[in-house]
């Protein structure tokens, strides 16, 4: 298991752009074709009583379980936004055993509920666990800087300096301000910066112009990286998924 295939994807709660139609069944089908070992998912609907009543084919189980079941993956879910009819948050789906996980509340205002989902995954043959963090940061730059400092503190406190690490998700960082903390302070690298020389454009899915989604890492060499643009992805969510093939150093 020297090589891992990673995907990060904001699934928009299983709806197409502008919430025009339910796409979670298409999402389930097409995620199978990516053959990802580990998926970092944002805006995952854990429960929603209104959608369950309104849509005939709404899954009876939480979306992270619905998707993980079709992939034969384990899953960890962190509920971030809780409201009267349900909740949504981040999820990590893994082909390999998830040893433990924790969801840390990183909300900095009452309008945006955000979390940092941290899982330790046991890869066969590896002497140490792989640390995986799935994030979805705020829209305002000053809020994101506060959340990045929390992320930094968590890594410095809980992740051994020599442990392999992947941080992926929707950073909402179109101004590319996250690099100061992640690449300079923590000495991480970003997948598409390493492979193509610039972050991936992933939003909006139909015509990506903004670099909102990222995959940061250490302890790997990047063999391939891809933005899954065009059909069918442009009709499934408002973000395009990103994938990377990573070789353990």
Image (tube, helix red, strand yellow):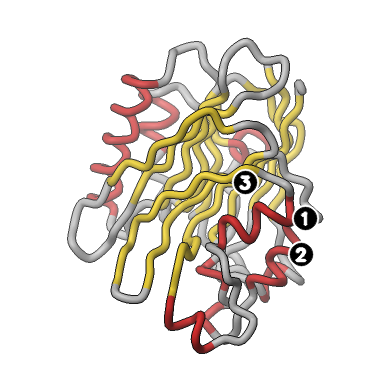
- Return the mark for residue 32: 1
How far apart marks 1 and 2 lie (CA) works out to 6 Å
> Residue beneath label 3, please?
39
- The structure residue drawn at horizontal position 27% and vertical position 34%, both measured from the top left corner, is 149
x and y, in percent, of residue 168 in the image: 52, 42
Nearer-the-camera pick, 32 or 47? 47
Considering only order in the chain, which callout, 1 or 3, is on the residue closer to the N terminus? 1
- The structure residue drawn at horizontal position 22% and vertical position 65%, both measured from the top left corner, is 111
Nearer-the-camera pick, 25 or 234? 25
Nearer-the-camera pick, 9 or 216? 9
Residue 28 figure quarter: bottom right
Res 209 visible: no
x and y, in percent, of residue 157 in the image: 31, 20
How far apart marks 3 and 1 lie (CA) works out to 11 Å
Residue 204 figure quarter: bottom right
Image quarter of the C terminus: top right
Considering only order in the chain, which callout, 2 or 3, is on the residue closer to the N terminus? 2
> Residue beneath label 2, please?
29
- Return the mark for residue 143: none
Q: Is residue 155 left or right of residue 164?
A: left
- The structure residue drawn at horizontal position 68% and vertical position 54%, both measured from the top left corner, is 69
Q: Secondary structure at mark 3?
A: strand
Is label 1 in contact with label 2 (beta carbons under 8 Å)?
yes
Res 130 visible: yes
């Amino acid at each position: 298991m020297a090589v891992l295939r990673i995907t990060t994807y904001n699934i928009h709660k299983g709806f197409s752009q502008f919430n025009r139609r339910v796409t979670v069944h298409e999402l389930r089908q097409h995620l199978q074709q990516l053959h990802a070992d580990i998926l970092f998912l944002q805006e995952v609907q854990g429960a929603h009583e209104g959608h369950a009543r309104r849509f005939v084919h709404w899954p009876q189980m939480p979306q992270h379980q619905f998707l993980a079941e079709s992939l034969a993956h384990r899953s960890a879910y962190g509920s971030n936004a809780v409201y009267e009819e349900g909740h949504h948050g981040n999820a990590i789906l893994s082909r390999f055993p998830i040893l433990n996980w924790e969801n840390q509340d990183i909300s900095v205002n009452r309008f945006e509920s955000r979390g940092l989902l941290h899982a330790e995954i046991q890869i066969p043959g590896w002497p140490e666990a792989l640390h995986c963090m799935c994030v979805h940061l705020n829209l305002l730059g000053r809020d994101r800087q506060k959340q990045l400092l929390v992320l930094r503190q968590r890594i410095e406190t809980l992740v051994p300096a020599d442990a392999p690490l992947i941080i992926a998700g929707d950073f909402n960082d179109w101004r590319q301000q996250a690099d100061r903390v992640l690449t300079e302070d923590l000495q991480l690298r970003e997948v598409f910066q390493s492979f193509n020389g610039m972050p991936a454009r992933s939003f909006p899915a139909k015509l990506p112009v903004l670099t909102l989604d990222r995959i940061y890492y250490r302890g790997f060499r990047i063999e391939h990286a891809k933005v899954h643009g065009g059909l069918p992805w442009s009709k499934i969510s408002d973000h395009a998924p990103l994938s990377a093939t990573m070789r353990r150093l």
